[in-house]
Image (cartoon, helix red, strand yellow):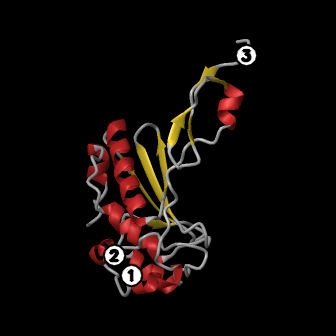
Amino acid sequence: WGGGWRRTVPYRVADGGLRASAQCLPLAAALAVRPARLPVRMSSIPPGSVQQLVGSASTAAELSACKIGGCCGKDTPLLPADALKERLAALPAWTLSPNGTAIRRDFVARNWGAAMAFFNAVSEIAEEEGHHPDLHLTGWRNVGVELSTHAIGGLSLPDLVLAAKIDCIDVDYSPKWLKEHALPAC
């Protein structure tokens, strides 16, 4: 290998544009160059206004119609246990974690492609809303989605809004899994 493996890495320049390195760099140098990133999404909605955005929405349809626009942060209020229980009843595909800090939905997709199509659809919604779930794929088609507002260490209204929106995604389920489980309502 001598001088190390060489490759070209895009990097951000002072004018904000992207440029490929003019020469191939040794791997260590290539990894030291900060890769180009998408601009950070900034929300104009203060975190404290989550309740105003969601209001009294409690059904799956009402929750999925809400726009949260990235208003999650360290000032986002935790959802009280009684309000969480009431709103979670409208999302039967989701279960509360044993410690009560997250909700999770699991299913079996028809195949790898169906699981990845679901993840791509979740990604689009998450980017629109500025709130991102933890996505899990095991055994090439066992899908898990976990929602929590990490900044506050628990559940907030945006978690339930995102769960309702995720339930509206058209999924190609495993036929066997589908026979044994009820589909979430959208």
Which dot marks residue 3? 3
Quadrant including the N terminus: top right
**Residue 90 in the image: x percent, y percent?**
34, 75
Say which label, 2 or 3, has the lower sequence index: 3
Asked if labels 1 and 2 touch by Cβ distance under 8 angstroms, the answer is: yes
Quadrant including the C terminus: bottom left
**Residue 181 in the image: x percent, y percent?**
31, 56
Say which label, 1 or 3, has the lower sequence index: 3
Looking at the image, residue 48 sits to the left or right of residue 141; the answer is: right
- Residue at 52 percent across and 37 percent down: it is 19
Please state which of residues 59 and 28 is positioned toward the viewer in this rendering. 28
Against 24, residue 16 (above or below) is below
Say which label, 2 or 1, has the lower sequence index: 1
- Residue at 61 percent across and 23 percent down: it is 24
Please state which of residues 116 and 29 is positioned toward the viewer in this rendering. 29
Circle 2 sits on which residue? 66
Identify the amino acid type marked 2: Cys
- Residue at 45 percent across and 80 percent down: it is 85
Please state which of residues 16 and 186 is positioned toward the viewer in this rendering. 16
* Mark pair 2, 1: CA separation: 6 Å
Disc 3 residue crowd, few under 14, some 14–19, many 20+, Cα 10 Å: few
Against 135, residue 111 (above or below) is above
User: Residue 17, can we see it?
Assistant: yes
**Residue 58 in the image: x percent, y percent?**
35, 81
**Residue 76 in the image: x percent, y percent?**
55, 78
* Quadrant position of residue 21: top right
* Quadrant position of residue 113: top left
Circle 1 sits on which residue? 54
